Amino acid sequence: MPLEDIRAGRIKKLERLKALSREAYPASVKRTFLIGDVVAGFSALADNKKEISVVGRLMAWREHGGATFGDIRDGSGTIQLYFSKDDLRGTYDEAVELVDIGDFLEITGVAYVTKHGEPTIKVSEWRIISKSLRPLPEKWHGLQDEEEKFRKRYLDILFDEKTRDLIFKRATFWNAVRKFHLERGFVEVETPVLEITTGGADAEPFKTHHNALDLDLYLRISAGELWQKRLLVAGLEKTFEIGRIFRNEGMSAEHLQDYTQCEAYWAYSDYKDMYKFLCECYQYAAEATFGTQKFHIKDFDIDLAGEWPLIDYAEEIKKQTGIDIWQAQSSDILDKLRELKADIDPRANMGRLIDALWKHCRKHIGGPAILINEPKIISPLAKVSRENPKVTERFHFIIAGSELGQGYSELNDPIDQAERFAMQQKLRDAGDKEAQMADSEFVEALEYGMPPASGHGFSERVFSFLMDRHVRETQIFPLMRPSTAAQNQNSKIKMQNDNLKFKIL
């Protein structure tokens, strides 16, 4: 039956409910037990024959002559219902006429076991507490189209236990990350999402406009890096934030435009302290969420336990490609990238070329491993190494061929920072939209003095990798382009609602 006809039929049932003085969308309900608790304590409830009340969504409806069976589900479990003409008298026919699969019901009755041994609630009273106007997907198959699953995520969650379990795992993961930081003395903070200048990453931002201030602004591209460093200036020694960040860049199996990220800053520590801390954080969160340190990700078997090996940036590139980045010219690197069939803009600056070469190499590293000694040219916010002025005290975590988290000894020399901002601004002026913006107010804050510190940042990609799933699949509601069919359907339904709403009233 076409959707329009089904909706029209269910709207007629709304009219019938109104005629019977039955509310279809009441504000409150009677609930004495969760369904999961009924199932767990069913024997005792069946023995004392005391009436109980549950609420939930009707997931199945089976008529058998003078009786009807249904399955009702809430967030804790599912149980069978038994509607009998003898028990319900006049309201039985109303239930058969007005109730549809997908409706939310309030049920009162007693626990009893059917002759087939099925734990059941024998219904003495029923009430629709939310009438569904659209039919649910077919019970045994749910949504089959992958795009449709993302567009109607609520239905995918309703029918797919794996998707539902993913949501709880995601919550457990971030709660574990939060707990790990809090137990080690970090203060959770919130920093601005709207910024005059973006900072803390190399990325193209989203632009917006503040009407009240008549000011063009950007959505942040880091979880408050430059703001949290201001808090170090202010005397807070350990801060962290878990929040949403936005980058106006391409989409892939590993990258989205808006996602959750954790960043932390720790005074009087360096990058070595931080990579030890963050390694323990990953191990802690993995154990709390999945109960293991061992994972199969992409084509790699990963074990997060134990101490992770260190990989030197330049040595690894030379080992895999034969290119010595300290001696090579940009043309040498560009020729090698072409030979490797890597994606690169031939007009890219030296930093971007070296980064592209590294990104080719990292795909072959399973890890977990800790990448160190990243060149200064591509690390504008990190401190220069005490052993080698050409590299910075920065690290990346390499897992299954990707960078899943990073950190560094933070730059706290205001003159050096101003010079690096100036260099980044030249790159922006030359057309590099991902180069960092100069932030004079941040430099001013540094001039008041910021203690030696380290910082880290990692995104929800860590969780998606541990799940071994596309990052879009592990978001609860990923951003989707509206489908043409959906827009057309919405237009039709709007017309129907305009025609029917006065009848309901």
Image (spheres, grey):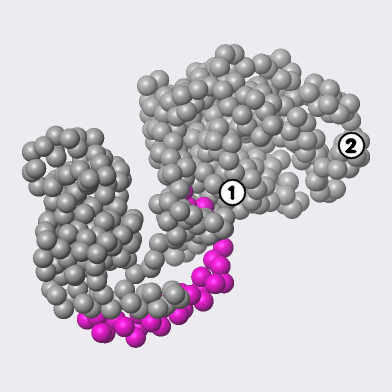
Q: In x, y percent, where is residue 464?
A: 55, 38
Q: Amino acid at mark 2?
A: Lys
Left or right, residue 116 beside residue 229: left
- Dot 1 corresponds to which residue? 256
Residue sitting at x 82%, y 42%:
342
Disc assigned to residue 336: 2
Q: Main secondary structure of the magenta part?
A: helix
Quarter of the C terminus within the rendering: bottom left
Secondary structure of the residue carrying tag 1 is: loop
Above or below 361: residue 260? below
Above or below 255: residue 491? below
The question of residue 494 being in magenta is answered with yes
Using the image as rendered, state which of residue 198 and residue 76 is in the foreground: 76
Q: In x, y percent, where is residue 468?
A: 59, 36
Q: In x, y percent, where is residue 231?
A: 43, 32
Left or right, residue 493 beside residue 74: right
Residue 351 visible from this viewpoint: no
State which region is magenta: 476-505
Above or below 133: residue 309? above
Q: Earlier in the sequence, mark 2 or mark 1?
A: 1
Q: CA distance from mark 2 to mark 1?
A: 29 Å
Within 10 Å of the Cα at label 1, are there few (<14), some (14-19), or many (20+) other Cα atoms?
some
Q: On the image, which quarter does residue 331 sit in?
A: top right
Q: On the image, which quarter does residue 137 sit in?
A: bottom left
Using the image as rendered, state which of residue 487 and residue 105 is in the foreground: 105
Q: Amino acid at mark 1?
A: Leu
Using the image as rendered, state which of residue 14 and residue 336 is in the foreground: 14
Left or right, residue 40 beside residue 164: left
Left or right, residue 149 beside residue 500: right
The question of residue 37 being in magenta is answered with no
Q: In x, y percent, where is residue 102?
A: 33, 61
- How many tags in the picture? 2
